[in-house]
Amino acid sequence: MSRPEPVKLPLTPIFETGRGAAYQADAVAFLQTFPDESVDLVVTSPPYDGQPKYQKGEVYDRAWYQGKFLAVTAELLRVLKPDGNFVLNYRSRRYNKERGLIQYELVFWLRDQGWLFVEDFIWGKPSPPPGRFNQCLKDAVEYCFQFAKSDSFRFFPENCLQPARWDKRDRERRLRLPQNHVRVNEPSGHGRIRVRAAVEMARPSNLLIAEPEFGKNPANHPARFPLVIPEFFIWLMTSDAEDLVVDPFGGTGTTAVAAERNGRHWLVSELYPRYADAMRERLEEETRQAVLVPVSDV
């Protein structure tokens, strides 16, 4: 069975490789050039609420999310394959004594749009920046919401197995307990086959521990996620070198770098010229390396 040709867009890229291309373009205009059901995975992080809007004295507010952002996700719903996934990294800012609610409202808005809300992954940061308010702790958590078009979404946890956190004696003890490997009907729900408590390698949880991005930031991007975040979802939700990963809010190109390093096709866009320039320079530097070494596991 022949594979489909990689998606080619009627736009001029600012950078391209044999596997992908980056564009300086509006997110909606970028996505409108895609064929229907042509994308396997979307990993993106839109501007956070209250963030300055291109240094023009405006900010991204509730109206922007209900208007522009939902126009972007409507296009994503069209271009995603029936078994594709959409991962949204987002965290509402704190307004003095209260946390913003857009991070939760987005889930309901997207469900109303036709998305299936699959999972909320938690990105935990061991060394978050200092807090700025007297009556709260340091903000060490962000969400990565997983959405899909249907319940047939692709999912490959065997690609992301991690060493189990129990020692050899504990594994031996657990193997003697039938509820860990034989189905039993307990009122508490314990004993389901999926427990597999004695294996040496186990599925990861939905808690992702990763430091914030501390590398060089020539464009002063305010909210970059580390490479391990998109890389984790690329391995969890794609399985083939022909799979296409897309980021319509490309920022400085983290999703593109993760896809390039892990042998996936990719297409990304960024509207703001300063970030687009930084993304192009980063991708040029990345692809000059003789050997692309995958980043560490989450």
Image: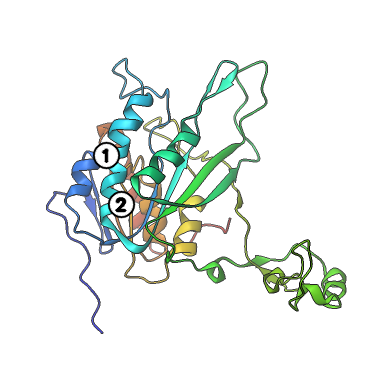
Marks 1 and 2, Cα distance to the nearest angstrom? 10 Å
Q: Position of residue 249 (x, y in %)?
A: 33, 41
Name the residue tied to disc 2: 77
Which of the image's four quarters has the N terminus? bottom left
Name the residue tied to disc 1: 71
The residue lying furthest to the left in this view is 10
Q: Position of residue 275 (x, y in %)?
A: 31, 35
Q: Is residue 293 visible?
A: no
Q: Which quadrant of the structure image shows residue 248?
A: top left
**Relative to residue 227, is residue 96 drawn left or right?**
right
Q: Residue at x 73, y 77 (%)?
A: 183
**Relative to residue 118, is residue 198 drawn left or right?**
right
| Badge 2 density bin: few <14, some 14–19, many ≥20, Cα 10 Å | many
In terms of depth relative to the viewer, which is nearer, 245 or 173? 173
Q: Amino acid at mark 1?
A: Ala
Q: Which quadrant of the structure image shows residue 196?
A: bottom right
| Badge 1 density bin: few <14, some 14–19, many ≥20, Cα 10 Å | some
Mark earlier in primary sequence (1, 2): 1
Of helix, strand and loop, which one carries label 1?
helix
Relative to 136, is 255 above or below? below
Of helix, strand and loop, which one carries label 2?
helix
Q: Amino acid at mark 2?
A: Leu
Q: Residue at x 18, y 42 (%)?
A: 29
Q: Residue at x 28, y 33 (%)?
A: 68
